[in-house]
Image (cartoon, rainbow, N blue to C red):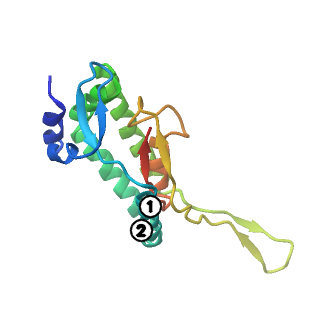
């Protein structure tokens, strides 16, 4: 079986980047050390949120179908690395391999769904009581959306209020998404 370092290399990541932090991430399977991740201060979190707000101001000007294209490309990358990501989920969350791969597949499916949503951002034109007047419903960007996901569902989750849905929905609807795992 691949080690976490092997899996990170398969994903094009440098394992040394996950060996520098003060917080230990251990596998619930056998307690093996998977990574050391940095701890962030409240000030660093606020700075990340500020950067996300700044980015969302530019991102909102990108047409929704182009934002949906980014979600499609993300889904393609997940497809390309499904096996390695599924193994990583298995190690990290203590799941059997089939569940790890299934969780990645759920995210791929939701990406595909969200691409379609990116072309459905239209509003209504509503009749008015005033002559020569119309009311229009339009969608406006939500802005920054924060997500805290459960440790045992690091990729997917289990319903419309979970990280996979929030991320995929936030991108076409012009959001930015800082994410934190619990």
Is 48 situated above or below 154?
below
| Dot 1 crowding, Cα within 10 Å, few <14, some 14–19, many 20+ | few
Task: Name the spot of residue 13 as percent of width and height, x first.
Answer: 17, 46
Q: Secondary structure at mark 1?
A: helix
On the image, the x and y values in percent for residue 46 come to 46, 61
Q: Position of residue 73 (x, y in %)?
A: 30, 52
Quarter of the rendering containing residue 95: top left
Residue 19 or residue 137, whichever sits in front: 19
Query: Residue drawn at (30%, 19%), measured in percent from left and top?
Result: 29
Horizontally, is 76 left or right of 64 in the view? left
Count residues near mark 2 (Cα–Cα under 10 Å), then give few for <14, some for 14-19, many for 20+. some
Front-lying residue, 148 or 47: 47
Q: Residue at x 75, y 74 (%)?
A: 134
In-front residue for pair 43/83: 43
Q: Position of residue 22 (x, y in %)?
A: 29, 43
Which residue sits at x=51%, y=39%?
162
Q: Quadrant of residue 153?
A: top left
Please state, as top left, top right, bottom left or bottom right, where the N terminus lies in the image: top left
Mark closer to the observer (1, 2): 1
Give the mark, 1 or 2, whose residue is nearer the N terminus. Answer: 1
Which residue is rendered at x = 20% and y = 42% of the image? Answer: 19
The residue indicated by pointer 1 is: 43
Task: Give the residue pinned by disc 2.
Answer: 55
How far apart are the two marked residues, 1 and 2, measured between alpha carbons? Answer: 18 Å
Looking at the image, residue 140 sits to the left or right of residue 182; the answer is: right
């Amino acid at each position: 079986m691949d080690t976490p370092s092997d899996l990170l290399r398969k994903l094009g990541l440098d394992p040394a980047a996950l060996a520098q932090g003060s917080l230990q991430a251990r596998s619930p399977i056998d307690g093996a050390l998977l990574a050391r991740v940095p701890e962030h201060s409240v000030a660093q979190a606020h700075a990340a949120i500020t950067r996300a707000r700044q980015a969302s101001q530019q991102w909102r000007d990108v047409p929704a179908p182009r934002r949906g294209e980014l979600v499609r490309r993300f889904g393609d990358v997940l497809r390309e690395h499904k096996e390695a990501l599924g193994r990583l989920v298995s190690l990290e969350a203590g799941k059997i391999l089939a569940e790890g791969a299934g969780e990645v597949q759920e995210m791929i499916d939701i990406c595909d769904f969200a691409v379609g949503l990116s072309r459905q951002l239209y509003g209504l034109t509503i009749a008015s009581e005033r002559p020569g007047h119309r009311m229009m419903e339009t969608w406006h960007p939500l802005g920054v959306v924060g997500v805290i996901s459960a440790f045992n569902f690091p990729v997917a989750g289990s319903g419309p209020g979970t990280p996979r849905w929030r991320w995929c929905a936030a991108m076409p609807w012009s959001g930015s998404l800082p994410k934190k795992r619990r």
